[in-house]
Amino acid sequence: MAALHFEFVSPERVLFSGDVDQVDLPGVEGDMGILAGHAPLVTPLRPGILTILNGGSREAVVVIGGIAEVGPAGLTVLADRAVARDEFDTAMLAAEIKDAEEDVGDATDDAERDRLARRLEQLKTLQAALAQ
Amino acid sequence: MPSLKDLRNRIAATKATQKITKAMQMVAASKLRRAQAAAEAARPYAASMEKVLGNIAASVGTLEAAPRLLRGSGNDQVHMLLVCTAERGLCGPFNTAIVRHARERAIALAAEGKEVKFFCVGRKGYDQLRRQFASQIVELVDLRAARTLHFEHAETIAKKVIARFEKFEFDVCTLFYSRFRSVIAQIPTAQQIIPPLFDTKASDALGGAAYEFEPEAEDILHELLPRNVAVQIFRALLENAASFYGAQMSAMDNATRNAGDMIRRQTLTYNRTRQAMITKELIEIISGAEAL
């Protein structure tokens, strides 16, 4: 099987760069698995768990926001924040959910409230997924 | 002629100064290592961001619905110069070089009949630009309180810039900062961030295939463009921080060496004066003894 070239960067550093078998992404419109030769695609990421599969090993990383681009050169993920799942601080996520709840309450127009409510939902889903 | 005591005091003062510059050099050197690592780590993200955005922009093309942040406001009458400098001096020509670069651009633009506005990040650049362009400076962001640079700082600045753009206050925004090449070479750089300029070669990379967007391209661009502004500013701030410490280190190295030279010269004068006094006293004693 052809290898997928994967670049995983956050503003602070390069988290991963190399060839892998498959990457599972938390896209805003649903999870997707990217294999080598995937059609060119651009999608923002929702807060969720990104899984790197390589030669039978799995590596889970918690990603908070970002964007993924699949091009001829491979997959590029630009994460706003990314922490390995084992090191992820759930207290921080709880604080973020609290903030988001307050934001939803403060929102003035409907479009803004919808957007914030969606974000809150995504954060809660992530919390549930991490609790398992 | 200064007395021996004066000379001794002067040597002591120069030595004290040398100790300070030496300490500052070492502090700058250790901070430089961290700043340099941060700047280098941020480069791939900013570069990938630019590449991704360039690819998207190329496939969206000259879409009418493209956000204004991408295609610009349609003219280039009012220019905003975003000048990033340090908060502190004692770093050789670092601040002056950036300001000079921005000033030359401002004068060239003014000669073409364009309007120029300044957005200053960092106290030092503001102080220097104020002398000439006081009425054109629209905002000053002070990062003195920030001990380490975080992405949030860049985001705050980006939000302010974009808010002004949305209010039609300017058409083109250019970022001025100092790119870190090495400890002794920092290059004052100008980078246009609104509307962003892309490498036209990037559009060929896709080989004609079109991107699939999930959700719509416009939604993605709406989210991505402000983010790109913040990322480019963040990169500039990190490069600036590294350049600042590099410039400060070499400036302080020079100062330490100059102080060393000065101490040698002063010691020589001191010894000469002392010797002259001893000789004079001897002559007086001898001629006094001969007179008897």
Image (cartoon, coloured by chain):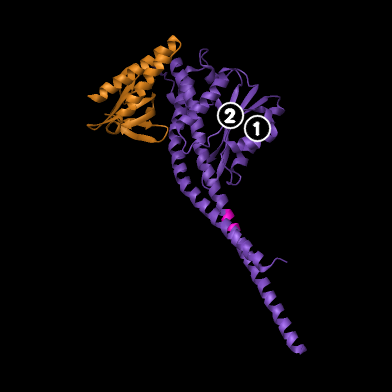
Chain colours: A orange, B purple
Report the residue at 66% width, 75% height from top.
Answer: B275
Query: Residue A106 lies in what quarter of the image?
Result: top left
Distance CA(mark 1)–CA(mark 2): 10 Å
- Disc 2 residue type? Thr
Percent position (x, y) of residue B29?
Answer: 48, 49
Query: Residue A19 lies in what quarter of the image?
Result: top left
Percent position (x, y) of residue B111?
Answer: 72, 28
**In screen coordinates, is B84 left or right of B32?**
right
Camera-nearest residue between A54 and B4: B4
Q: Is residue A71 magenta?
A: no
Under circle 2, the secondary element is: strand
> Residue under mark 2: which chain is it in?
B
On the question of residue B212 being in view, the answer is no
Which segment did they paint magenta?
B254-258
Report the residue at 61% width, 63% height from top.
Answer: B11
> Does the CB distance between marks 1 and 2 fall below 8 Å?
yes
Query: Residue B151 lies in what quarter of the image?
Result: top left
Q: Residue B105 carries which label?
A: 1
Q: Residues within 10 Å of mark 2 (few under 14, many from 20)?
A: many
